[in-house]
Amino acid sequence: MIDPPFLLIEADIWKIRVQLTKPVTWPPLVWGVVCGAAASGTPLCIGTCKIDGLPAYIVGNFHWTVDDVAKSLVCMMMSGPCLTGYTQTLNDWYDREIDAINEPYRPIPSGAISENEVITQIWVLLLGGLGLARILDVWVGHDFPIIFYLAIGGSLVSYIYSAPPLKLKQNGWSGNFALGASYISLPWWAGQALFGTLTPDIIVLTLLYSIAGLGIGIVNDFKSVEGDRALGLQSIPVAFGAETAKWICVGAIDITQISVASYLLGAGKPYYALALLGLILPQVFFQ
């Protein structure tokens, strides 16, 4: 039996909608929520209570209960499909002129999806993500809706990354750092705030680690050099050339991770530092 044409068209449009959200970009944010939940310890005591010279913490407030697993899944849905989907769709909308040069076959420049359908998708994903954030705050009993405000902040960063007049992605440094912070810091903060307290040291450390995300963002810039140059966007490959950009890319990733290993060593955690170095060395070799 052959499906009616309108059913085939409807199936195609949903494939295009999913394509715009780029599901391949969701796992890092889902993993960030897991990391934040694992780090969500609360102090064992107030003041100067320490173990091995460091503040004493219970390791993680997440437990394998139905309630905690459900909270985690909702947080992952907020961070991945909803807000990352919003970010990716928004970015494709504002990149439609560049994509018409670099990748004219993509859904928006090719006309496979209409302007109204794209704008509707952006709003549905944004409001869905913010709604889930507010639900999580109520669910865990936050007096201050921190997850909701993190979601608003992340959504704002996504907007100014892609949209004029700021359009952070016009500059390779600010754009890629914003991208790294969105993928590394924000989901971690959400996971940690969901099950514990978001502390200043975690905020600083994850923002520093976001410098590694700058390198990851540069990898993505290589595929759009022609369009970026034509439209005057100063991505790292356009500004410095492909060869120099290659070394900036790996340097940002490796130096950040080595710096974190040094921090762990200085904090009296030599085994954690060695474990991290053990993961970095194969990465450097294959680069």
Image: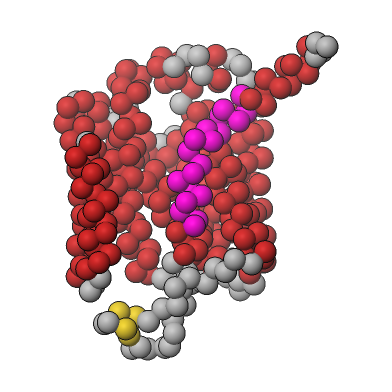
Q: Residue 258 appears in which quarter of the rendering? A: bottom left
Residue 171 visible from this viewpoint? no
**Residue 73: within the magenta?**
no
234 or 213, nearer to the observer: 213
Name the residue rendered at 45%, 77% in the picture. Answer: 58
Work out whether 156 lies above or below 25.
below
| Residue 265, x across and y down, in percent | 20, 67
Name the residue rendered at 32%, 62% in the picture. Answer: 205
Q: Is residue 215 left or right of residue 155?
A: left
Q: Is residue 90 left or right of residue 125?
A: left
Name the residue rendered at 32%, 18% in the picture. Answer: 226
Q: Name the quarter where the C terminus is drawn.
A: top left
| Residue 3, x across and y down, in percent | 80, 14
Name the residue rendered at 54%, 68% in the picture. Answer: 62
| Residue 169, x across and y down, in percent | 37, 36
119 or 137, nearer to the observer: 137
Work out whether 65 lies above or below 102.
below
| Residue 54, x across and y down, in percent | 30, 79
Q: Name the quarter where the N terminus is drawn.
A: top right
Range covered by the magenta-colored residues? 16-34
Q: Main secondary structure of the magenta part?
A: helix
